[in-house]
Image (cartoon, grey):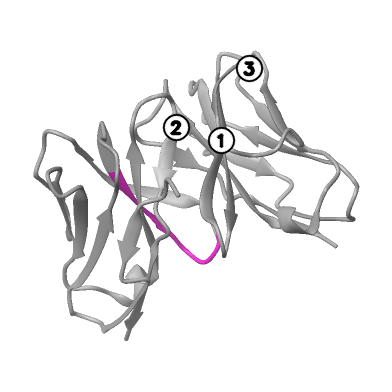
Amino acid sequence: KAGVTQTPRYLIKTRGQQVTLSCSPISGHRSVSWYQQTPGQGLQFLFEYFSETQRNKGNFPGRFSGRQFSNSRSEMNVSTLELGDSALYLCASSLEYGPEAFFGQGTRLTVV
Amino acid sequence: SQQGEEDPQALSIQEGENATMNCSYKTSINNLQWYRQNSGRGLVHLILIRSNEREKHSGRLRVTLDTSKKSSSLLITASRAADTASYFCARNTGGFKTIFGAGTRLFVKA
């Protein structure tokens, strides 16, 4: 069974640009969660999707958004990038919701 | 911050020694989990303990949970160099949201 796949693995963007990250969950998993990981703030919850519906979101500005498609694949978008958005963005999937989540390898975003 | 506190922040031990990491939290939980992360990669689920359980074992891992003290500990016995990683506790309080601690960086010297 294939694991959680995140694309791209690495990304360099310029301040002010926008970026879209993709996450393909494990087959059959319908819950997808996104996290931002930085050295200073650790792992911060961004949002969780289930059956194309956002069920919870963390304390991030509106520049951070996401969606989930009918095949459970999910994307997150960050608009008007800031230097502080540089981070490892992790996606996790689970059957319904947790408690065990399976993580992808992450997308390393660098904003310059 | 909603994050729990983990200590120590970093731990360096010799191969064969035991490693103990602690996690404290502030709100009630449904369950608590421990994850491992190798050098900026994805997290790997290690073990889950439910709020009505006090101790769980999985191979060389032993997790305890004290809900009265709002704390948990992860013990890795007979550590190996391959155990070098960051370890995170994560708690689920309901509401489709999991809160991660700041993590403990473990370094096992061969």
Determine which residue is flagged by label 3.
Answer: A71
What's drawn in magenta, residue-wise? Answer: B33-40
**Tag 3 secondary structure:** loop
Label 2: how many Cα within 10 Å (few below 14, some 14–19, many 20+): many
Residue A92 placement, left or right of A72: left
State the predominant SS element of the stretch in magenta. Answer: strand
Q: Nearer the viewer, mark 1 or mark 2?
A: 1
Nearer to us in this view, A75 or B28: B28
Label 1: how many Cα within 10 Å (few below 14, some 14–19, many 20+): few
Q: Quadrant of residue A112?
A: bottom right
The reply to whether dot 1 and dot 3 touch (C-beta < 8 Å) is: no
Quick check: A112 above or below B43?
A: below
Q: Position of residue B2 (x, y in %)?
A: 42, 45
**Three-letter residue code for mark 2:** Lys
Q: Position of residue B13 (x, y in %)?
A: 27, 83
Determine which residue is flagged by label 1.
Answer: A58
**Same subunit: marks 1 and 2:** no
